[in-house]
Every structure is written in structure tokens, then in C-alpha cells.
């Protein structure tokens, strides 16, 4: 049967939004090829019957539950491989994010399956699923078709919307898995550590975001002053590169492993616009980018682009906005 | 400890990338650079060696690709690798990510490393995935996007950013670790190292030499076929201002924002 298997990540008793998006997408596409969508969950006692059944509201008819280590990819590969061996799923679908990439790729190796990552569209074609992904810095789209018994589709983050319906309770099936030796050779010591101050960027109307182009941590002050000049519901955000470098708190990070935002105005200062950042902010209503590199990808999806030196432009822009507000 | 670093030749960032319409594959004719992410992996190997917590006997750069990929190996050696291994075979052309990972794992089996390092992504296409494919074939624990790595108790203590914040994971060796670019600042090779790179041992192997099953590689051995390349829906191009007179530039920005009631 052309069933679709997804993995649903959870943390502290709540499921991941992107994973639930994969369930909704899997259910919609499976129905077009005459199959069902099932989900795998791996974790501890917080995976109660009730919690697992709730995945049914997103379209899954069965949830396979295994006890095992959370937050690591390789145990999930063991579980999914076993479930696929026993039930013969035709596709495995992931909602993007770090673990989805790792599990999907590892499963492709285990099951000798084809894998496509960064997928933005899945569609049914002659009773099979095909996956569309952007390539070459999003300048082209490529279509993947699968051979063999299993096709693996890893979505781009936010590509699949979680659609909750009324009712719909999934059947919970416990799976006993003997984990691979190497799955037991990685141990989570600490999970989900928050680094830096807690800041709220998701509710902001205006975001001033800083990237490596700011040059040094101290220059975030330029972004903060500009944000202050805008006033109201304005906050400062950051790219992954500068968060990993310790320039700005993790809670302010936009993109693949950070937050997804859609403010009225997104002002990107010194951000090149890598795909991993773009996926977290491309739905912003107005995008303004300032960067000294005229070839920066961000100019391809900004509404207003300024090629120039931040150190010169930001202070003057701050003054001009203050003046405008005052006048 | 023996460390293998997987490296890859990618198009120079300044060269426009395109699909070759006659083959439907990435046009790789303009390639000439070591994938920038891989330089972080070599640097990470060098820092383990120099850190002194464990003795590193050998750092071996490993690549798969046509003859030109040798340049990536020379660069890797100039950055600190002791020697290199080049897996090159006509039959590997057109391999998808799963087939490529399989082929690389066979080359690595020959080397028997204690640690396999690679960059978290390549500039030209497949992201995040090759490490996980290689690890499953080698039956080793694996993490991607690692930004801090310390040798501890005969294993590695790794940190990375995942969905809910920073994770710290202890990994036993042998292992496959892909590193993020925040892990270090790669050093520049010395002139002497660049000149000497071509003299370091470089071994070339074909698919048969490392026991690769021909039915699992190349276009026929790949289980995903990419095609139907087409343009995404057109997005209206934004307005671009080149900053010459900053006062004037700022006036234009303010007017633009004001028009949209954003101030």
C-alpha cells in the first residue's frame, strides 16, 4: 500500500510544528495515491496515549511509539527502518529541521532509498509522489522522481503547514526496537540549552536583524539604536552565524534552527541571505536589506536593497527616523 | 588517532552555477575551489592534533570526483592534511547523495579511521546529509552541524544548535562528525605548505579497488532522478540603491518607509 510514514519530533510534552506539518502534508498526499499517513514518535514516558492519539487531528491514522533516546537521529532511523520493514511504507516524509535531515539521510542509506531534501512541494503523479525542490540558490526548481520501494522526502522548514481538524484520533501502536550498537554510542548530556538573554522577536511589527556583516559584536548597538528609533513594537534579531559566535542571544535567532517571523518590516543589516536564513523571514511584508556586497543573495528577495557601508548608513538612518518621528 | 576529512571541489562562488542542458546534471566545468565548509573540518582536525588531549597519527583528506578534484585535495593538504585519497571512477558519475555516501563509505573502510570529519554542507547542492549516509554505512554514531568539539574520556563531547536550543552530546569513537562554520576560523596555508602540497602522498583508487558494488552507484544505481528543471514563479525585483551620498541614501530609505507607513 502506498502509505506515507513521518517522524514527529517532540520536546517537553509538545510536538514540533514542522513535524505536524509533515503529518498534514503526508495525509493529504497519501489520500491522493490511495494510502494512509502514519507517524513515528520516539521518547520516554511523556509520550502518553493521549498525546500520541492527538497526532490523528493532523491526519495520521496510526502512531508507532517506541521508547528510546530523544533528540538524536540514529535511534529514530532504527525505529523507522523496522516499521517500514514490517508495514511496507512507500514514502518517508520529514518536516525539515536538523533531525529530519539526519534521519532522512540515514534512512536512505539503511534502506537503499532515494532522498530529496529542501523540498517545497510534494504532489501526486500517476499514483506516485514526486518532490519539487529549489536548487542553485533558489533560482531553479528541480523535480525528483523515485525508483525502488521507498522514496524519502525531506521538506524545507515551514514548507508544510500543520492543519488541525476536529476529531481524528490516531491508533497508537507500540514498537519494540533493538537499537543498533552505534545508536547507543551517542548520549544526550544536555538538550535545549538557552544561551543569552530571553528576547521576544516573534510578536514584533518591525525587526532590525543583524548578521556577520556588522563586523563585531559591539556593532549590534547600531541595530539596537535603530530599533529604538523606530520605537513601538520593534525588536532586534540575528542570524545563526552571529548567535553561534556569541554576539547575540539564541532567542533572537531567525532561520532554519531559529524562529520564523513575518513582521511588517524586516530590515536586514549585514545579512547575506543564505537559504537557511531566508526560510525564517521570507514571509515578511516588507524586506529592506543593507549590505556592502552587491552580489549578496538577499538582494534577490528584498523589496528595497541598499549597497553600502552599514557603519555609515545605520547611524544616519537612526538620526533621520528620530527626526521624522519627532517632527 | 587517525582522522579522515571528507572534502569536495565546488564551483567558485564567483562563477554562475547552472544545469548542463545536455546531461541534466550540474555543470561542474567551472569548479575550482575547495568547499569552504570543508576548510573548517580540516581546521578542526588540526586543532585536535595540536590540542594534545590525544595523539593524532594521521590526517587524511578523502574526496570523490573527477580528475580535477585533485585540486581540492592539494588545498586540503596545504591546510594540514598529511596525505590524500582520491576515489575516481567513471562509474560513479551521476551518483545521487545516497550513492555518493555509499561510495565514500567504502573508501573510508579502507582507511579505518577513528574519526571522520566533514563540513556541514557544500556550496553546490546537497546539504547536511552526506555525513548521515556515510555514518549509517560505517555503522558509526554521527552528528551534524557541530560547533564545538572536545576530546574527552576517549570520545568526543560535541555541542550543536538543534530545534530547541543548544544540545550537548557525548559520542564514542569511531564517529562521523560534520562541523558548522562557527566551530573555528580556518588558518591560511603558508606559501611553503602550498608549494609542498603536491609532494605529499596522493593515492588514487577506482571503484573496484575499494569494493564498491557497481549496482549501487552512478546514475543507474541512484534511486532518485532529478529533472524537469524550471524557473520558480517570478518575483518582482526590488529597488536597489547604491550608496554614494549617504545623506541622500538615507532620505530615500525614509521616504520609502514613510510611503508604506512603516515609520
Image (cartoon, coloured by chain):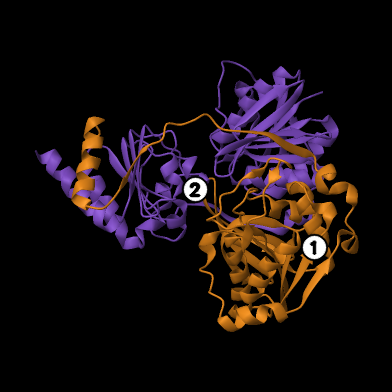
Q: Colour of chain A?
A: purple
Q: Where is residue B163 in the image (x, y as percent from the top left)?
A: 54, 45
Please state if A321 lies on the left or on the right of A172 as rendered: left
Q: What residue does disc 2 label? A: A274
Please state if B107 lies on the left or on the right of B146 as rendered: right
Spot the residue most to the front.
Answer: B22
Spot the residue most to the bottom.
Answer: B192
Residue B129 — which label? none
Q: Chain B is drawn in which colour?
A: orange
**On the image, which quarter does residue A114 sit in?**
top right
Q: Nearer the viewer, residue A71 or A36?
A: A36
Which of discs 1 and 2 lies nearer the camera? The answer is 1
Q: Mark 1 touching mark 2, by CB under 8 A?
A: no
Q: What residue does disc 1 label? A: B87
Compared with B90, A117 (above or below) is above
Q: Where is residue B220 in the image (x, y as percent from the top left)?
A: 85, 42
Q: Where is residue A315 in the image (x, y as percent from the top left)?
A: 22, 54
Amino acid at each position: 500500500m502506498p502509505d506515507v510514514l513521518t517522524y514527529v519530533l517532540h520536546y517537553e510534552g509538545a510536538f514540533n510544528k514542522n513535524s505536524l506539518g509533515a503529518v498534514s502534508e503526508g495525509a493529504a498526499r497519501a489520500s491522493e495515491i490511495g494510502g494512509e499517513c502514519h507517524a513515528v514518535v520516539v521518547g520516554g514516558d511523556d509520550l502518553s496515549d493521549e498525546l500520541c492519539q492527538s497526532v490523528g487531528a493532523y491526519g495520521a491514522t496510526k502512531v508507532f511509539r517506541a521508547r528510546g533516546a530523544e533528540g538524536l537521529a540514529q535511534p529514530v532511523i532504527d525505529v523507522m527502518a523496522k516499521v517500514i520493514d514490517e508495514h511496507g511504507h512507500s514514502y518517508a516524509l520529514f518536516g525539515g529541521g536538523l533531525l529530519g535531515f539526519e534521519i532522512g539521510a540515514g534512512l536512505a542509506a539503511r534502506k537503499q532509498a532515494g532522498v530529496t531534501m529542501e523540498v517545497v512541494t510534494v504532489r501526486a503523479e500517476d499514483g506516485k509522489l514526486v518532490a519539487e525542490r529549489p536548487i542553485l540558490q533558489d533560482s531553479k526548481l528541480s523535480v525528483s522522481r523515485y525508483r525502488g520501494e521507498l522514496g524519502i522526502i525531506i521538506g524545507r522548514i515551514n514548507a508544510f503547514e500543520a492543519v488541525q481538524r476536529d476529531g481524528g484520533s490516531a491508533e497508537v501502536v507500540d514498537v519494540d526496537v533493538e537499537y543498533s550498537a552505534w545508536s547507543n554510542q551517542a548520549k544526550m548530556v544536555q538538550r535545549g540549552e538557552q544561551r543569552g538573554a530571553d528576547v521576544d522577536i516573534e510578536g514584533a511589527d518591525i525587526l532590525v536583524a543583524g548578521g556577520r556583516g556588522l563586523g563585531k559584536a559591539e556593532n549590534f548597538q547600531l541595530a539596537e539604536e535603530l530599533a529604538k528609533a523606530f520605537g513601538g513594537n520593534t525588536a532586534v534579531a540575528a542570524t545563526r552565524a552571529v548567535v553561534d559566535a556569541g554576539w547575540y542571544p539564541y532567542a533572537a535567532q531567525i532561520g532554519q534552527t531559529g524562529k520564523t517571523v513575518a513582521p511588517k518590516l524586516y530590515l536586514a543589516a549585514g545579512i547575506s541571505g543564505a537559504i537557511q536564513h531566508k526560510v525564517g523571514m521570507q514571509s515578511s511584508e516588507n524586506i529592506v536589506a543593507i549590505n556592502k556586497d552587491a552580489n549578496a543573495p538577499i538582494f534577490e528577495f528584498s523589496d528595497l536593497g541598499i549597497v553600502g557601508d552599514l557603519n555609515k548608513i545605520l547611524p544616519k538612518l537612526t538620526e533621520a527616523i528620530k527626526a521624522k518621528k519627532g517632527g | 588517532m587517525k582522522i579522515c576529512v571528507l572534502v569536495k571541489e565546488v564551483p567558485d562562488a564567483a562563477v554562475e552555477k547552472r544545469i548542463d542542458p545536455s546531461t541534466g546534471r550540474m555543470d561542474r566545468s567551472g569548479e575550482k575551489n575547495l568547499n569552504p565548509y570543508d576548510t573548517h573540518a580540516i581546521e578542526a582536525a588540526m586543532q585536535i592534533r595540536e590540542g594534545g588531549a590525544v595523539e593524532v597519527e594521521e590526517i587524511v583528506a578523502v574526496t570523490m570526483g573527477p580528475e580535477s578534484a585533485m585540486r581540492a585535495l592539494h588545498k586540503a593538504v596545504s591546510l594540514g592534511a598529511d596525505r590524500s585519497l582520491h576515489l575516481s571512477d567513471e562509474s560513479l558519475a551521476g551518483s545521487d547523495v545516497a550513492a555518493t555516501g555509499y561510495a565514500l563509505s567504502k573508501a573510508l573502510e579502507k582507511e579505518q579511521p577513528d574519526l571522520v570529519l566533514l563540513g556541514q554542507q557544500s556550496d553546490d547542492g546537497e546539504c547536511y546529509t552526506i555525513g548521515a549516509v556515510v555514518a549509517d554505512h560505517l555503522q558509526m554514531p554521527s552528528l551534524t552541524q557541530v560547533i564545538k568539539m572536545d576530546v574527552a574520556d576517549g570520545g568526543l563531547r560535541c555541542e550543536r544548535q538543534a530545534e530547541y536550543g543548544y544540545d550537548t552530546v557525548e559520542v564514542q569513537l569511531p564517529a562521523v562528525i560534520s562541523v558548522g562554520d562557527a566551530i573555528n576560523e580556518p588558518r591560511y596555508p603558508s606559501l611553503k605548505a602550498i608549494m609542498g602540497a603536491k609532494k605529499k602522498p596522493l593515492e588514487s583508487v577506482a571503484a573496484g579497488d575499494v569494493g564498491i558494488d557497481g549496482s549501487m552507484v552512478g546514475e543507474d544505481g541512484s534511486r532518485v532522478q532529478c529533472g524537469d528543471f524550471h524557473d520558480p514563479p517570478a518575483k518582482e525585483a526590488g529597488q536597489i540603491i547604491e550608496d554614494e551620498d549617504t545623506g541622500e541614501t538615507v532620505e530615500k530609505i525614509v521616504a520609502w518607509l514613510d510611503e508604506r507607513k512603516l515609520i
